[in-house]
């Protein structure tokens, strides 16, 4: 329970506990390692040291009357171990169905006499018929459990098994520190200190147990039986409520469902083989009756709250969309008077009209917004997806929005009762396991307004203006034809048309939009409505009306003045969303999100890149603040060791990690010895800050302990980009000040392993990155070494 790290430091459950003890006693420790080829030999060697007095204290000691005659024990233990059953992850055996198994086949050591007795007692108490499979090694037990010849394997809960979940634990055994016989002074002081720790921090033992011995059991993968159930299920009739773009709507030309709901249903089909038949729901004053009349199995786009589900006699799935609630009101209305004003609601919420006189019912949420804009109603409710969508495509100049910061709306599927529990389980697991990046992709793909639809709506809303503009343009063309050469006239007209097109497009949003032409190597970047630009591009030219800026020879200009990832996002995106840190011209530092879409011609050849740039400082800050509360190191604010290992392990096991880096501060011990621990803490904080700036917000950056840090890149990264980041970190080093405010610096060494798409264990990747770090240290420190992944 104490192990030596590669840098010579120690870690482990007992080590952390002894550190807490030292806070009360002032003790300092010298850790003595026993020699021996096997664990039993090392354990016997430690007992010999305890017998001879070579060591003052030994941990991980069980208590017995015989041992109590040989050694001094405290009354208080510092931890508890349990006999435990481990079953394969995603297997048939779980914590919840263990008691109903009837017969339980368990793989265990042939020589495990006491654990066998504990298992037999556990099974007898739970009325389980026990069948044991005798084994001689842990590997044999794991193989038998994975092959299905055994349901579970028997071990101690403080041992972690990759690919297995703990389904039961019993027969607790406390473990103690012990001292040589006659050394009661040490034991009495230790005993009193453990009692004080239990009083001041009663959860410490559970915290350390979770940190070192427990793994997350969060897993939403379908079992073989669940997948077979879904694939063999009949087609499900899905009722669709009135248009709620971009969440869901029916295309009037094709009758097909489109929107976020369509994307989620496609995801369910891809993952489980479920088939769906879309059934538009007709308007009715009795929504519950309309659902039954349509003879559907489920309803899409249901407001996920208990009162709605009960009134419609539906069982709710896990939500697939969460958004903030907005009040959309006529700008001539005083918001303080809402209770006395007329509320517009879509027909599926018409039941509200039965209880109030000042409610008007409309066919769709779009009709509700138009009614508010025209003054037929005073206000309505929408969310942060529907309200921006309709206000951007419609002529709704008389509406304002008021965020409801404490109110969020969630959207789910409602299953008509009685529901098949197996079906609800499959859908819930898939929705809860929907990866965040895929969820964002679904939202983005379906929140975009189709360009042809946007042009048609614009033409309808501005017919007179367009007619007048066309007449004016015709007159101008005639005059120009009389005064200038044909070529000059054509060039001037093209420029004016481009200006008008961009002015209308950019006027629809206060975000920063861009278009990169591959043929002309020209980047056009809008100037948003706000007081300042979001992304600032040097050497660009301002348009005459100030609505956008133009950058010629864009590829070379961006390569010189910006980050390589920004260059890729603007000119040749290999992913939909790129998040990166940014230094603004006014000195501020923040984060940008560049959302890029590649446009191709009829032959499939890329011709341009379009997208938008959004400042995401608040999102990144909120994400970091929430994580810090439970998963971050108190000194540096980075992920702590346990959280980094868990999250990096998930990325590595899923084959989604681009690289794993280990960073070590060179000669850090000399900082503490020379300038004190306050200066050392400052150096560690500055190192953490340098790593935050160097990597993307979705990359994992953690402190493993002491002066050792690690980075796991979330997603692929080009070799050149990775080299550039490592070179920048090593080249800049870390500056810090001592207690006299004198500035010093330390150098960093980096070892890393570049990964491919195949899954790899955390242990394997860590060992290879650590080997690269060792090389960097051996070659003189203050450098980085990157290696290609080697499979073991």
Image (cartoon, rainbow, N blue to C red):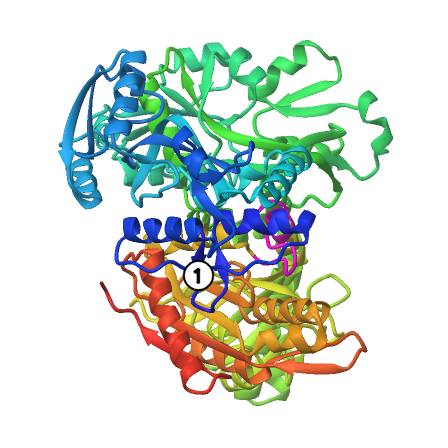
Secondary element at tag 1: strand
Q: Residue at the location (37% across, 23% down)?
A: 424
Can residue 239 be spotted in the picture?
Answer: yes
The image quadrant of residue 682 is: bottom right
Residue 264 magenta: no
- Region in magenta: 623-638
- Residue 506 placement, left or right of 372: left
Quadrant (top left, top right, bottom left, bottom right) of the C terminus = bottom left
Dot 1: within a 10 Å radius of its alpha carbon, few (fewer than 14), some, or many (20 or more) residues? few
Please state the horizontal and vertical placement of residue 599, each as a whole percent of the image: 41, 65
Q: Which residue is at the front of the view, 232 or 496?
A: 232
Q: Which residue is at the front of the view, 604 or 255?
A: 604
Q: Is residue 339 above or below residue 745?
A: above
Q: Is residue 388 above or below residue 665?
A: above
Find the residue positioned furthest to the bottom: 485
Q: Is residue 732 above or below residue 525?
A: below
The image quadrant of residue 86 is: top left
Can residue 252 be spotted in the picture?
Answer: no
Please state the horizontal and vertical placement of residue 111, each as a whole percent of the image: 19, 34
Q: Which residue is at the front of the view, 176 or 624?
A: 176
- Residue 259 placement, left or right of 106: right
The image quadrant of residue 732 is: bottom right
Please state the horizontal and vertical placement of residue 561, each as a whole percent of the image: 59, 83
Q: Residue at the location (64% across, 54% down)?
A: 27
Q: Is residue 84 above or below residue 183?
A: above
Q: Which residue is mark 1?
A: 4
Please state the horizontal and vertical placement of residue 34, each as a whole percent of the image: 37, 58
Q: Residue at the location (29% across, 17% down)?
A: 121
Residue 632 magenta: yes
Number of marks drawn = 1
């Amino acid at each position: 329970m104490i192990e030596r790290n590669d840098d010579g430091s120690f870690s482990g459950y007992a080590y952390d506990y002894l550190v807490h003890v030292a806070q009360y006693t002032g003790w300092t420790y010298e850790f003595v390692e026993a020699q021996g080829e096997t664990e039993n030999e090392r354990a016997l060697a430690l007992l010999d040291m305890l017998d001879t007095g070579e060591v003052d204290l030994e941990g991980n000691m069980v208590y017995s009357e015989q041992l109590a005659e040989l050694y001094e024990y405290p009354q208080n233990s510092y931890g508890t171990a349990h006999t435990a059953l481990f079953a394969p992850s995603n297997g048939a055996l779980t914590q919840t169905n263990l008691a109903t198994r009837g017969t339980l086949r368990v793989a265990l050591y042939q020589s495990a006499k006491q654990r066998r007795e504990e298992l037999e007692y556990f099974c007898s108490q739970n009325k389980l018929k026990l069948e044991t499979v005798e084994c001689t090694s842990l590997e044999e037990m794991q193989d038998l459990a994975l092959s299905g010849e055994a349901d579970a394997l028997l071990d101690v809960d403080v041992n972690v098994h990759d690919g297995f979940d703990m389904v039961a634990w019993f027969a607790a055994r406390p473990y103690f520190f012990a001292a040589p016989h006659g050394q009661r002074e040490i034991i009495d002081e230790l005993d009193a200190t453990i009692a004080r720790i239990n009083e001041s921090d009663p959860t410490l033992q559970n915290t350390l147990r979770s940190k070192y011995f427990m793994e997350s059991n969060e897993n939403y993968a379908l079992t073989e039986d669940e997948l077979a159930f879904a694939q063999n299920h009949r087609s499900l009739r899905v009722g669709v409520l009135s248009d709620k773009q971009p969440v869901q709507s029916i295309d009037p030309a094709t009758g097909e469902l489109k929107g976020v709901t369509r994307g989620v249903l496609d995801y369910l089909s891809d993952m489980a083989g479920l088939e769906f038949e879309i059934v538009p729901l007709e308007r009715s004053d009795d929504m519950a009756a309309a659902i039954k009349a349509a003879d559907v199995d489920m309803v899409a786009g249901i407001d996920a709250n208990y009162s709605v589900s009960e009134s419609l006699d539906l069982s709710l799935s896990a939500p697939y969309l969460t958004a903030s609630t907005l009040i959309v009101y006529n700008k001539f209305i005083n918001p303080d008077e809402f209770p006395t004003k007329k509320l517009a609601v879509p027909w599926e919420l018409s039941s509200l009209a039965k209880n109030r006189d000042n409610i008007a019912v409309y066919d769709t949420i779009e009709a509700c917004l138009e009614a508010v804009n025209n003054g037929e109603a005073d206000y309505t409710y929408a969310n942060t997806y529907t309200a921006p969508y309709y206000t951007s495509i419609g002529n709704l100049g008389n509406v304002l929005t008021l965020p409801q910061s404490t109110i969020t709306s969630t959207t789910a599927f409602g299953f008509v009762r009685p529901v098949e529990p197996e079906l609800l389980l499959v859908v819930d697991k898939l929705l809860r396991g929907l990866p965040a990046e895929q969820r964002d992709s679904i939202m983005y793909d379906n929140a975009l307004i189709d360009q042809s639809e946007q042009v048609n709506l614009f033409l309808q809303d501005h017919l007179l203006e367009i007619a007048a503009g066309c007449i004016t343009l015709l007159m101008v063309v005639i005059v120009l034809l009389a005064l200038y050469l044909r070529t000059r006239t054509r060039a001037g007209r093209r420029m004016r048309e481009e200006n008008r097109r961009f002015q209308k497009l950019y006027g629809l949003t206060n975000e920063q939009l861009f278009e990169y032409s591959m043929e002309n190597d020209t980047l056009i970047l809008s100037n948003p409505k706000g007081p300042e630009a979001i992304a600032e591009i040097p050497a660009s030219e301002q348009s005459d009306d100030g609505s956008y800026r133009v950058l010629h020879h864009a590829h070379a200009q961006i390569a010189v003045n910006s980050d390589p990832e920004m260059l890729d996002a603007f000119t040749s995106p290999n992913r939909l969303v790129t998040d990166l840190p940014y230094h603004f011209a006014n000195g501020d530092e923040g984060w940008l999100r560049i959302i890029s879409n590649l446009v191709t011609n009829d032959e499939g050849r890329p011709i341009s890149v379009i997208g938008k740039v959004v400042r995401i400082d608040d999102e990144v800050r909120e994400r970091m603040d929430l994580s810090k509360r439970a998963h971050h190191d108190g000194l540096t604010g980075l992920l702590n060791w346990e959280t980094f290992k868990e999250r990096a392990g998930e990325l590595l096991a899923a084959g989604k990690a681009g690289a794993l880096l280990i960073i070590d501060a060179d000669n850090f011990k000399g900082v503490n010895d020379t300038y004190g621990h306050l200066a050392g803490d400052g150096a560690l904080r500055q190192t953490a800050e340098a790593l935050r700036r160097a990597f993307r917000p979705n990359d994992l950056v953690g402190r493993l302990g002491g002066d050792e840090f690690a980075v796991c890149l979330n997603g692929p990264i080009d070799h050149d980009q990775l080299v550039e980041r490592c070179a920048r970190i090593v080249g800049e080093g870390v500056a810090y000040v001592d207690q006299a405010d004198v500035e010093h610096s330390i150098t960093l060494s980096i070892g890393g392993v570049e990964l491919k798409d195949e899954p790899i264990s955390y242990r394997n990747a860590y060992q290879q990155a650590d080997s690269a770090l060792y090389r960097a240290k051996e070659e003189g420190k203050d450098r980085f070494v990157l290696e290609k992944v080697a499979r073991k």
